[in-house]
Amino acid sequence: EEGGEEGADGAPSAARLARLARKAQAARVARLRHKQFVADRQEENSALEKDEAALVAEEAAAAPATLAAVTADLRRALKPEELGQLASWLCERPGGAAYVETYLQQPKKVEPAPVTAVAAPTPVAIFPPLPLMPEVPFALAPTDAKTPSSKPPASRSDGSPLPRPTPSPAAPPVPPHR
């Protein structure tokens, strides 16, 4: 068949059989190497997942003490007026109210619910308050044509009239698709 590698009786030659055997052995070794590689990566992944779980548990255990320490440090370092100023600055920023709630507010004491024979209602999650909306400049504020207070002034601060906007040319109508 291939370049005269058959013997006189039509059977494959010894050289071809040896080459096929070497090829099969190399394929077996490659499959075993790949299998070992995958097993090593799975073992490494399992070890990393265990380490991550241990770190997350350690962090969760230390979080309340750390939060209490940071809050106590802030209260010791700042006067009540300074704490109020810091809270107002934080509330002016998007998302800052959550920091105020977490670090600057007095801790809330939660009373345990009385145990009764009747099934207790499902507890409701208490979310931190939404951050205050930042002040929007007049030019960006939404306008409502019905309220006169939302109309822009008809003149500049120096008394000169504002230029009237020129209407933009309308786009030509698009023919209907048939």
Image (cartoon, grey):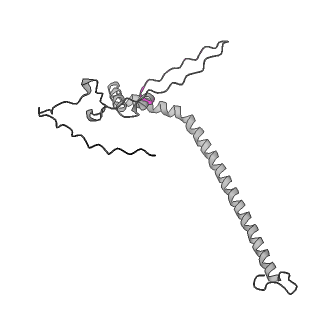
Q: In terms of image quadrants, where is residue 168?
A: top left
Q: Main secondary structure of the magenta part?
A: loop
Residue pictured at 53% horizontal, 34% vertical = 63
Quadrant position of the N terminus in the picture: bottom right
Residue in front for this viewpoint, 166 or 13? 166
Residue pictured at 32% horizontal, 45% vertical = 172
Report the residue that reaches farthest toward the bottom: 8
Question: Left or right: 15 with respect to 45?
Answer: right
Residue in front for this viewpoint, 99 or 11? 11
Q: In terms of image quadrants, where is residue 34?
A: bottom right
Report the residue that reaches farthest toward the right: 9
In percent of width and height, residue 29 lies at: 74, 68
In percent of width and height, residue 167 lies at: 24, 40
Is 82 located above or below residue 48 in the figure? above
Residue pictured at 58% horizontal, 42% vertical = 55
| Residue range (magenta) | 102-113
Residue pictured at 42% horizontal, 25% vertical = 105
Q: Is 103 within the magenta?
A: yes
Residue in front for this viewpoint, 31 or 151? 151
Report the residue that reaches farthest toward the top: 117
Tally of numbered discs: 0
Q: Is 120 within the magenta?
A: no
Report the residue that reaches farthest toward the left: 159
